Structures are given as C-alpha cells and as structure tokens.
Amino acid sequence: MATPSAPTIDLESLRQSFSGRLLNDAADLEPFVVDWRRRYFGRALAVAMPDSVDDVAAVVRWCAGHRVAVVPQGGNTGLAGAATPDGGGRSIVLSLARLKRVRAVDAVNNSITVEAGCTLAEVRAAAEAAGRLFPLSLPSEGSCTIGGNLSTNAGASRCCATAMRASCARGWKW
Ligand SMILES: Cc1cc2nc3c(=O)[nH]c(=O)nc-3n(C[C@H](O)[C@H](O)[C@H](O)COP(=O)(O)OP(=O)(O)OC[C@H]3O[C@@H](n4cnc5c(N)ncnc54)[C@H](O)[C@@H]3O)c2cc1C
C-alpha cells in the first residue's frame, strides 16, 4: 500500500501571521540550510525572519498548529550542525537575524538588555561605549549572535572561568 503523502503546507497563511520576512525561494534558502563548515546540508519549507518577539511567538504558534518543526538560527556559526534543518524538508528555519536592538545599557547595574539577534561584537561594542567590558569573546563574534551564545553555552578564555550561561546571563525572555 502506498504511503500517504504529507499534506501541502500553505505558506501564505504563515506569511500573513507575522511581520518580517519570509523566504521560500530556493536560492534565498541556501545559506540557511547548510552549516558554517558545509558538513551538514538540509532542506526547509521556508526561512522566517520575524521583526519582534511577538512575531517570533506568532511563527512558533503557526508551526505548532501545522505540525512543522522549528529550527532556530542565529549567526549559523555553530560547529555541530544544530542550526541546520534535517533533510525532510518540513522544517521552518526561524532566523533571529532581524531582532537586533540593544534595548538598554545599565552601567550602574553592570547589565545590558539586548535582543537575541545582536551579534556578540555588537553587544561588546555597546558595553564598551558605556565604559564596560562584556567578557565573552569568540573568534566568530562578528557573526554569532547572543541568542546562539546562550543556546550553545559558548565560552572561551575571556568568559571568566566558566561559560556564557553561567557567568554572563542574568535572565532571558522567550
Ligand atoms: C571561527 C569560529 C570560532 C569559534 N570559536 C568558538 C569558541 O571559542 N567557543 C565556543 O564556544 N564556540 C565557538 N564557535 C562556535 C559558535 O560560534 C558558537 O557556538 C556560537 O555561540 C553560535 O552562535 P550562533 O548565533 O552562530 O548560533 P547558530 O549556529 O545559529 O545556532 C547554534 C544553536 O543555537 C540555537 N539557537 C540560535 N539562536 C537561538 C535563539 N535565539 N534561541 C534559541 N536557540 C537558538 C540553534 O538552533 C542551534 O541549536 C566558533 C565558531 C567559529 C565559526
């Protein structure tokens, strides 16, 4: 007996559910479905690039409602293939690249509030402009994002004795 084919996904309803960009042209998808070292190649229905935290929630809600897997992606510099969708072609890559605001720098409290898609270099520069040091530093800091740093618990010699989540993060909001 033939296996029933997967139901067609109506991407137009996804496009209308949030503010931001939705890429579904094969050429546009290419950089998002391969990892930094070009070791893992995947497929995706589309790349959603929301403009706000509420739009992130809207994309996730749509994906849950349509039983579509979500693959969050920041700078795509991870070396373990975790930001690359699988080969099934039924995932949405959720790119945080447009969430780039530094919301607050509090020099008295030694804290900074940033959106997930800020690169590590942007966060370090914002801290430095306030006369403070953001201690995490990675060779990939021009591309990797703070959301990816938290997710991977990235760490290096300048991140105190431990890694990102333990030493630098006071909290995060989804
Ligand atoms: C040249 C080079 C040097 C590096 N040096 C180091 C090093 O010294 N130390 C080190 O620890 N790592 C290093 N890395 C690895 C990499 O840069 C880090 O793991 C970085 O934290 C990944 O961030 P990203 O934004 O690129 O995440 P991505 O690669 O986009 O994603 C990595 C993982 O995080 C998830 N993710 C991303 N953003 C979010 C989000 N907003 N919310 C939830 N999940 C999310 C993804 O789904 C995936 O599972 C290096 C990489 C390169 C290319």
Image (cartoon, helix red, strand yellow):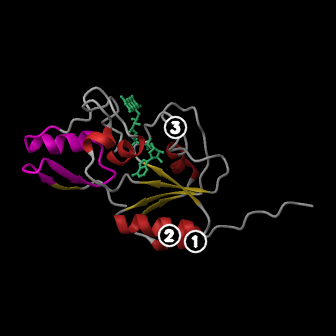
Q: Identify which amino acid the numbered label 2 is placed on.
A: Arg
Circle 1 packing at 10 Å, graded few (<14), some (14-19), many (20+), is few
Residue 169 painted magenta: no
Residue 148 x, y percent position in the rendering: 39, 45
User: Could you give the CA–CA distance between mark 3 and mark 2, rounded to whole angstroms?
Assistant: 26 Å
- Residue lying at 25% horizontally and 53% vertically, measured from the top left: 114
Q: Is the residue marked 1 within 8 Å of ligand 1, measured from its CB? A: no
Expressed as whole percent of the image width and height from the top left, the position of residue 146 reads 32, 46
Give, as a single range, the part of the protein colored magenta. 105-133
Residue 9 position, x and y percent, is 64, 67
Quadrant of res 155: top left
**Residue that label 3 marks:** 35
| Above or below, 28 relative to 2 | above
What type is the residue that disc 3 sits on? Asp
Q: Which residue is mark 1?
A: 65
Give the foreground label among 3 and 2.
2
Numbered circles on residues, count: 3
Q: Earlier in the sequence, mark 3 or mark 1?
A: 3
Which residue is situated farthest in the right direction here?
Answer: 1
Ligand 1 is found in the corner quadrant, namely top left
* Disc 2, SS: helix
Secondary element type, mark 1 = helix
**Cα separation between marks 3 and 1:** 28 Å
Discs 3/1, front:
1
C-alpha separation, residue under disc 2 versus residue under disc 1: 6 Å
Residue 61 is labelled as: 2
Quarter occupied by the C terminus: bottom left
